[in-house]
Image (spheres, rainbow, N blue to C red):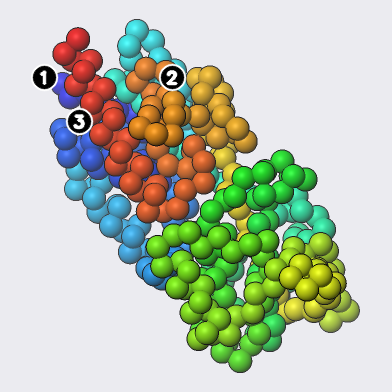
Amino acid sequence: MEKERILIIGGGPAGLEAAYNLAENNYAVTIFEKDTEIGGNIKKWVKLFPDFGDAAEVRKNFKDKVTRQDIDIKTDISINELYSENGKWFAKNSSGNVYEGNAALLATGFETFNASRKEELGYGIYNNVITSVEFEQMYKTGKIITAEGKTPERIAFLNCVGSRDEKVGNHYCSRICCINAVKQAIEFKELVPDAEAYCFYMDMRMAGQFYEELYRKSQEKFGVTYIRGRISEAAGTIDNRIQIKSEDTLTGLPLKMTVDLLVLMVGIESSDSTTALAKQNEINGEYGFAKSVGLHGSDNLTKKEGLFLAGSCKRPLTLPETIADGRAAAIQIIEFLKLKVKN
């Protein structure tokens, strides 16, 4: 008897974890990944918070798990249409190829905020204003340097770029920026112990396990300085440094500082594919994310029978939460298919 097949849109942590668990339970799985490699946003990171785990090792573990199973992984394929007919689900790519399944899982992840939308911060205008993603790629080389090839003597990290911001229309917290700023500040100080590292914040949201401990460690062991206040403007100087204007909201005093490198901690936004496929299926929620039936017990379900959600296509999630959510989605899909057979 032919196995029931599940179509998974997205080859990031949520989709891969769900695929592995479904295959373990003797279901056929097809994964569609728009990039040339699976792994999702993990590919952009070197170390993961809060334990500085090796991102490449985590990605390898996912790859090993899914390749041990009979899972059909299709990379470099974008799904443009996702729809159901007569109790089946169909995924159509840009070439017009159509794939059929008994259920579908949307695991299309997230995209990072385009920092050039915050023109006042100078990204794309001044070479020494970079994003947290670019900092991570630089860290991979073992050196943090300015555009002129110099080692920074002073660096600033700015939280909440593209999050909790009415001007760009994102009122929500991305949940990963605060702890990521702590991690990257420590990474910088490990490489350049004598340099100064400053972190500008609205409030430090250290809600995860070991987050508060890492935050304290960054101050006590590495001497990272935290300033409560948002940067209102960044401008280039004649010597290619970055002058920033802010306010220390704890003292109520204006602040002006010149740094060698400004790192913008960019937040999470819904991916284009999430927004498009969710809208097609009338499950579009706030800010372009996909909407589940409910947070408590039905978070992987949608109002469309046979269509499920996993990971950050719903809202910002940390990596451990994303992995757990992929596993939960697999359980919900298995329950759905078993009940369908009985009926």
The residue under label 3 is which amino acid type? Tyr
The answer to whether 55 appears left or right of 203 in the picture is left
Residue, disc 2: 303
For the residues labelled 1 and 3, the Cα–Cα distance comes to: 12 Å
Marking on residue 27: 3
Which residue is nearer to you in this view: 320 or 137?
320
**Dot placed on the residue nearer the N-terminal end, 1 or 3:** 1
**Dot placed on the residue nearer the N-terminal end, 3 or 2:** 3
Q: Specify the farthest residue to the top.
A: 86
Residue, disc 1: 1
**Dot placed on the residue nearer the N-terminal end, 2 or 1:** 1
**In the image, residue 319 above or below residue 144:** above
The answer to whether 89 appears left or right of 71 in the picture is right
The residue under label 2 is which amino acid type? Lys
Identify the residue shown where x is 55% and y is 60%.
205
Which residue is nearer to you in this view: 281 or 151?
281
Q: Which quadrant is home to the C terminus?
A: top left
Residue 256 lies, in percent from the top left, at 83, 76
The residue under label 1 is which amino acid type? Met
- Residue 284 in sight: yes
For the residues labelled 3 and 2, the Cα–Cα distance comes to: 23 Å
Secondary structure of the residue carrying tag 2 is loop
Residue 91 lies, in percent from the top left, at 41, 23
Secondary structure of the residue carrying tag 3 is loop
The answer to whether 232 appears left or right of 156 in the picture is right
- Residue 114 in sight: no
